[in-house]
Amino acid sequence: MLRPSLRKSNQMRPVSMETGINKWAEGSCLIKMGGTHVLCTASVDFNQPTWKRIQNKTGGWVTAEYSMLPRANGTRKSHEAMTKDNRAVEISRLIGRSLRSVVDMEKLGRHTITIDCDVIQGDGGTRCASITGGFVALALAVRWLLAQGRINENPISANVAAVSAGLWNNELILDLDYEEDCVAEMDSNFVMSDDGRFIEIQATGEQHPFTSEQLNQLMSMAQDGCQKLIDLQNQILE
């Protein structure tokens, strides 16, 4: 069965990344994955987070905050409602975990980098776009620290990208848009590093259980999709 977008089962949406989109942030990237547009900014603080200072810990920290603008979706969501959004908290933690997995906190020094991911327009896969664009913003902020002489060595050991995959109309598909995601029988998100290893897998049988064979096939599709995203990240960061 043809997908609503007429894409093949393993075909991703058009993806673009634009850097330098925010003049104040030490790193910024506007990522567009089809109809999903996310502005990712990286802000550098020359101090450790309070909890690290209290515990007398060494090294820096990377954290993230995710939010959707009021009219990112078909129905407006007020700013007040956004502050009570448990989904946004969960996604913020996912982004932070994903990016910290490839950062040596000792090499980062006593700095905190906060990645803000603001969804301008949502059409499925916003957390995956946030991780992928957030990595570019992070890499640019680290370059800024190196250029400023604040750190002596790049603390980032690998690229990070993420893509969704799922079961839709009994077909395994890659990079679900909203029209597919809202009725998918299975929905999953894969976060990967550039050496092909998985950082995090989120998979849910929305309508019925799924098999290990289906999950393995989705993992293979996600590896190909993430590699394409990582290749684009490298082109943007050249």
Image: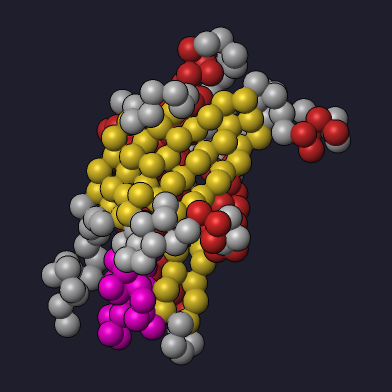
Q: Is residue 163 visible?
A: no
Whether residue 161 sits left or right of residue 115 in the image: it is: left
Q: Front-most of 3 and 79?
A: 79
- Judging from the image, the colouring scheme is secondary structure
Q: Position of residue 116 (x, y in %)?
A: 50, 41
Q: Front-most of 213 and 33?
A: 33
Q: Quadrant of residue 63?
A: top right
Q: Front-most of 232 and 14?
A: 14
Q: Residue at x 57, y 36 (%)?
A: 114
31 to 103, vertically: above or below: below
Whether residue 54 sits left or right of residue 136 in the image: it is: right
83 to 115, vertically: above or below: below
Q: Is residue 120 visible?
A: yes
Q: Position of residue 187 (x, y in %)?
A: 42, 73
* Magenta stretch, residue numbers: 162-185
Q: Position of residue 1 (x, y in %)?
A: 17, 82
Whether residue 25 sits left or right of residue 62 in the image: it is: left
Q: Position of residue 101 (x, y in %)?
A: 58, 44
Q: Residue at x 46, y 26 (%)?
A: 25
80 to 180, vertically: above or below: above
Residue sticking out furthest to the top: 149
Q: Quadrant of residue 177?
A: bottom left
